[in-house]
Amino acid sequence: MPSLHSDEAAEDFVATVDLTRYDLSGFKPMRCEIEPKAAALNMRLPASLLETDVAQTR
């Protein structure tokens, strides 16, 4: 695979090249975070409260 240095180059490559020429079996999914998380929150609450909250957000 060639090195692609921009989104535009990657889009052009995928649109114009026959990808069956490449062995992509070693590729793995990549997950990108748009904004790194700086804090975490874990809460335990009654199921009824959670259900009420979920219902109100719909």
Image: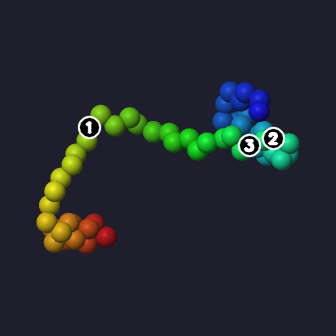
Residue 37: x and y in percent read 34, 37
Quadrant of the rendered structure where residue 12 is?
top right
The structure residue drawn at horizontal position 72% and vertical position 44%, both measured from the top left corner, is: 25
Q: Residues within 10 Å of mark 1 (few under 14, many from 20)?
A: few
The structure residue drawn at horizontal position 16% and vertical position 56%, both measured from the top left corner, is: 44
* Res. 16 visible in picture: no
* Res. 53 visible in picture: yes
Label drawn at residue 24 = 3
Q: Is residue 42 left or right of residue 29?
A: left
Label drawn at residue 22 = 2
Q: Say which amino acid is labelled 3.
A: Leu
Residue 10: x and y in percent read 71, 37
Q: Are marks 2 and 3 in contact (CB under 8 Å)?
A: yes
Q: Is residue 29 left or right of residue 2?
A: left
Q: Residues within 10 Å of mark 3 (few under 14, many from 20)?
A: few
Q: Which residue is mark 1?
A: 39
Q: Say which amino acid is labelled 2.
A: Tyr
Q: Residue furthest front?
A: 26
User: Quadrant location of the N terminus?
Assistant: top right
Nearer to me, 53 or 50: 50
Whichever of labels 1 and 3 marks the residue nearer the N terminus, that label is: 3
Marks 2 and 3 sit apart, C-alpha to C-alpha, by 6 Å
| Element type where label 2 sits in the image | loop
